[in-house]
Structures are given as structure tokens and as C-alpha cells.
Amino acid sequence: MTLRRNSAAGADRRARDSKQIAHLVPTPNARLKLDILHADDAYLIINKASGMVSQPGLGHTHDTVLNAAFGRYGHQLRTLGARRDWGLLHRLDKPTSGAMVLALMPESYDHLRKLFQDRQIKKEYLALVHGHPQPAHGKIEARLVETDTGVKKAVVSAGGQDALSYYWTLAHGENASLVRIEIVTGRLHQIRAHMMFLGNSLVGDSLYPQPHLPSGGNSDGIHLHCRMLQFTYPHSNQQRRFLAPLPRTFIVAARKLGIALPPTLSGSLSKVTA
């Protein structure tokens, strides 16, 4: 019997294959562009490009963030091993751009992993969404469950995991808005699912669409950017904040939607602040 691509059995098989690939030592690829915001003995912070996958998996074994990082910091990352995800502390979806952190030492990985588990990492995103959120700022508490029928997706469900987001409308055009979002939890597609739940899906999001909303003239996918990460460094009480400048594609899309970006976002940003 031939299994359909979107069958549950097929999804389980692909998940197992991806997990096996994730345990292999990533192939170094120094030719991949890696926008480094900051690097020291403990951490590597990058500005991930939209369209780049975070870690190797099916269909992406040589062109991910980890492949690029191994091309430059392979010696350090190898010491962390598969048990510590080769230093990868969190992931951004393929279409999402922005700040990501990788640990370069086992101790720094364990420190930040605990902060993630204790929800002591501050993460701030910017997104272009359909319509004008009502109210203009607020809190979204909607439990999410992961589904996989060939494509992984998060669905609002009372039986899902807790998920908490805060949002603020920063600017808007006639049919779309720029919102700042802080996520307390880190569920799969949390921002995309929560904004759809609010009634303001991300512009260009075909996975979480709302057909009754106008397209806004965007045809090049979603614009979701992790602008800021903030956390306490190990062996100190020093809070470090890392800012990732907006990609040009985000700025251009906002202008097409008639959204005037605040000057601090459209201009150059300081990358690191102590």
C-alpha cells in the first residue's frame, strides 16, 4: 500500500528521519552567509535571514544556521554534542528572520537552557498583520496543540499547551498594521496562530489565513522578525540585550502596505547593549 504524503504514518516517518538527522554532526558550510551580531566565549548571536532553516532536517542537510555556524565555530559546537543540540538553544521558523542565540560552551548552554525553561528570556518580535488589532494592545492566552498532516501546524485547543503572548500596535496603514509581540512561552508557530486567533493573521501567511481579510498587496510571504533577545549572562547578574536590524524586505513590505515605520526601526540599530 502506498502512503499518501499527508498521511499520519508518513508524517511520523518524516519526524523520525528528521530526528535522526538532527543527531548527526552538522556538516560545516562556511560558504553560507551568517550575519553575526555578537560573539564571545559563551555565546554566538546571529541575525537569521528569512528563508534559512535553523537546523538540519529532511531537505535541508547542508544549508541551515547550524551548518553555517559549524563552518566558523565547529570546534566549539562539537564539544556540546547532540545531547545539547550542538549549541542550538531555540529555533526560528524558516520564514522568520531575526535574533538567534547559540551556546559555544556546555556551561553557557546549560545556563541559558534553564533560563528558557524558567521563562526568563525576553523575546520581542515585529510582524505585519492584516487589519487593525482590537484592542490596539493586549494579551493573548490561547492554548495550542501541534498537528502534523504533512505540514506541522499549531491549533488553538483547550487541551493544548499553555501559550501566552502580548502585543502592541506600533503603526498601521489602511488595511494592515505593524505590531510588536512578546512571547512568554515558545510554542510552535505561536505568534502566527495567536494572531489568527485574534483575527489579524500575518500578511501573506498561507498556513494561517483569514480569507475575509484583504491581501494588502503582499505576495512574498510573511514578515515576522525577532528584533530583540535579552537574558542574564552566566556567572553574573548582567542583563545583555541584542538587537537585530530589520531586513530590507520587511521595510519595503511595510511601505507597500502604507505603514510608516517608527524611525528607530527603519534606521540603523545598535546591535548590542549591556
Image (cartoon, grey):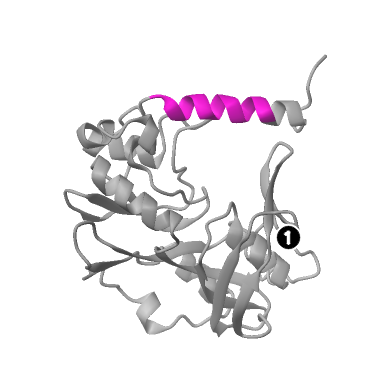
> Where does the N terminus fall, quadrant-wise?
top right
Between 128 and 151, the residue placed more toward the observer is 151
Q: Residue at x 66, y 85 (%)?
A: 135
Can the viewer see residue 191? yes
Q: Residue at x 65, y 58 (%)?
A: 205
Residue 169 on image: x %, y %: 56, 82
Residue under label 1 = 209
Q: Quadrant of the C terminus?
A: bottom left
Q: Quadrant of residue 86?
A: top left
Crowding at label 1, few (<14), some or many (≥20) Cα neighbours within 10 Å? some
Q: Is 137 in front, or is 109?
A: 109
Residue 125, position as x, y percentages in the image: 47, 67
Residue drawn 47% across the image and 53% down it: 50
Q: Is residue 54 above or below residue 112?
A: above
Predominant SS of the magenta segment: helix
Residue span colored magenta: 12-24
13 in magenta: yes
Q: Is residue 247 left or right of residue 222?
A: left
Farthest-out residue, left: 41
